[in-house]
Amino acid sequence: MFRLLLMFFAFSVLTSFHVLAVEERYPLQTKQQQVWFQELTADLRCPKCQNQNIADSNATVSIDMKRKVHALLLEGKSKQEIVGYMKQRYGDFVYYQPPVNQTTIFLWLIPCLALIIAIWLFFSRRGEKVQSEIVDENVDHIDELLLSMDDDSTHQDNGDQGK
């Protein structure tokens, strides 16, 4: 148990040094710039790594992108200007929130279409179930009528033979 606590303590100390090293590596002038830096590095995707943001990536291109974000923030650029710069340089793929245009329209429409199809299937299956219940009730009713007619004709045939 002591070893486990010692390992936990060592891990927490090392991670805090890592956080301090990151903050020292990219010093900014205002608290707002620091917040934007954190948000931008979390929202920008590494072009080399699949589905990893530049904050978590150690790829060379991600490090270069972090440096550029830092430099653009120091120049006084806004978040939108920095995202625009990165999209212009690396394409729409670099930003986790793709715009709606001719290339990406299917990314936005496919979930909507899937939802509409699922709703349609649900209600159409429900309608089939109701129809099959009605048919089953009618078949049962017809069977009862046929049986009663059979019984009536059997009784009539027996009555005709007795005369």
Image: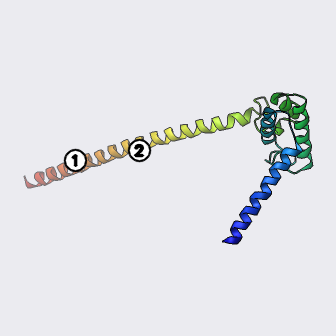
Task: Give amino acid for label 2.
Answer: Ser
Question: Splitting the image into 4 quarters, where does residue 40 fall?
Answer: top right
In this orientation, which residue lies closer to the viewer: 152 or 127?
A: 127
The answer to whether 17 is drawn above or below residue 116 in the figure is: below
Q: Residue at x 87, y 48 (%)?
A: 48
Residue 88 appearing in the image: no
Rendering coords of residue 32 (x, y %): 78, 32
Would residue 43 be found to the left or right of residue 146 on screen? right
Residue farthest to the left, as pictured: 163
Q: Secondary structure at mark 2?
A: helix
As helix, strand or loop, the secondary structure at mark 1 comes to helix
Is any part of residue 58 visible from this angle? Answer: yes
Instruction: Describe the colour scheme in one phrase.
Output: rainbow
Whichever of labels 1 and 2 marks the residue nearer the N terminus, that label is: 2
Q: Which residue is mark 2?
A: 132
Give residue 56's position: percent from left, percent from top: 81, 49
Marks 1/2: CA–CA distance: 25 Å
* Mark 1 nearby-residue class (10 Å; few <14, some 14–19, many ≥20): few
Q: Residue 128 appears at what percent x and percent y?
A: 46, 42
Asked if disc 1 and disc 2 are in contact, CB closer than 8 Å, the reply is no
Q: Work out whether 124 lies above or below 8.
A: above
For badge 1, the amino acid type reads Met
In-front residue for pair 97/145: 97
What residue is disc 1 on? 149
Which quarter of the rendered picture does the N terminus lie within?
bottom right
The residue depicted at 12 percent of the width and 51 percent of the height is: 160
Q: Nearer the viewer, residue 27 or 162?
A: 27
Badge count:
2
Answer left or right for 72 relative to 132. Answer: right
Which residue lies at the image location 74% right of the left edge and 66% below the top edge?
7
Looking at the picture, how far across and down is residue 76, in whole percent?
Answer: 87, 28
Q: Residues within 10 Å of mark 2 (few under 14, many from 20)?
A: few
